[in-house]
Image: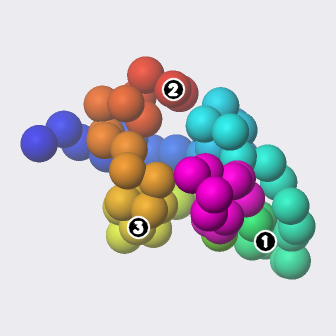
Amino acid sequence: MAKLPQVSGKDMGRVLARLGFHLADQKGSHMKFIRKFNNRKEIIIVPNHKVLRKGTMNNILKKIYLSIGELKKLL
């Protein structure tokens, strides 16, 4: 199992943008990214923190079906 890199909210936003998401809204420190995929709307909430926690990272990666290795390539 690969180790999760330390990623900021901005960096995660850039990764999501490369995957077709766009920033739809922001309330406080939480950014809302949306993309249409297979006639569905996918919504991901990312906190705009300096370093995202492991649990938050795992939840985001599971929702977008992205492995740690693929994440490292997109960074």
Q: What's the CA distance linking mark 1 and mark 2?
A: 23 Å
Q: Residues within 10 Å of mark 1 (few under 14, many from 20)?
A: few
The residue positioned 78% from the left and 71% from the top of the image is 29
Quadrant for residue 53, please give it. bottom left
Q: Residues within 10 Å of mark 2 (few under 14, many from 20)?
A: some
Q: Along the polypeptide, which appears first: circle 2 or circle 3?
A: 3
Marking on residue 59? 3
Q: Position of residue 2 (x, y in %)?
A: 19, 38
Q: Is residue 39 magenta?
A: yes
User: Tag 2's secondary structure?
Assistant: helix
Q: Which one is closest to the eye, mark 1 or mark 3?
A: 3
Q: Is residue 38 magenta?
A: yes
Magenta stretch in the rendered image: 33-44
With 47 as the anchor, is 61 left or right in this view?
left
The residue positioned 62% from the left and 63% from the top of the image is 40
Q: Nearer the viewer, residue 12 or 37?
A: 37
Q: Which residue is label 2 attached to?
A: 74
Q: Amino acid at mark 2?
A: Leu
User: Tag 1's secondary structure?
Assistant: loop
